[in-house]
Amino acid sequence: MDNKIAIIGIFIKDHAQSGKVNEILHEYATYIIGRMGVPYQQKSVHVISIIICAPNDTISALSGKLGRIEGIQSKALQATI
């Protein structure tokens, strides 16, 4: 299966869910190339950007697991490498 590179954007509105987000990201740590987190205090949201190189199924599974957490939104943008 071909790997793709993707950027997954994560918006954390419920800060109590941060632990769940980190647990899921830890599960996929072998695929993660980089991670950047920025707190946006004025809007009470934290934004995390993940760069990942993995099969399409893995990227979709990660983004889906994150998006199913209450108070979390995530989207993936993929490119074939």
Image (cartoon, helix red, strand yellow):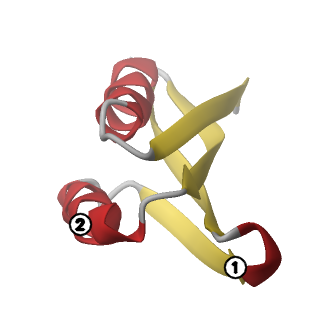
| Residue 71 image point, x, y percent | 42, 46
The answer to whether mark 2 and mark 1 are in CB contact below 8 A is no
Give the mark, 2 or 1, whose residue is nearer the N terminus.
Answer: 2
Residue at figure coordinates x 29%, y 34% from the top left? 65
| Residue 79 image point, x, y percent | 73, 28
In the picture provided, is 8 more to the left or to the right than 78? left
Q: Quadrant of residue 31?
A: bottom left
Q: Quadrant of residue 44?
A: bottom right
In the picture provided, is 14 more to the left or to the right than 25? right
Q: Residues within 10 Å of mark 2 (few under 14, many from 20)?
A: few
Residue at figure coordinates x 42%, y 23% from the top left? 60
| Residue 20 image point, x, y percent | 22, 60
Q: Quadrant of residue 30?
A: bottom left
Q: Which residue in the rendered view is the most extreme toward the right? A: 42
Query: What element does badge 2 sit on?
Result: helix
Q: Amino acid at mark 2?
A: His
Rendered image: mark on residue 73: none
Residue at figure coordinates x 64%, y 76% from the top left? 36
Locate the N terminus by quadrant.
Answer: top left
Q: Nearer the viewer, residue 25 or 57?
A: 25
In the picture provided, is 62 more to the left or to the right than 76? left
Residue at figure coordinates x 48%, y 22% from the top left? 2
| Residue 23 image point, x, y percent | 19, 64
| Mark 1, residue position | 38
| Mark 2, residue position | 26
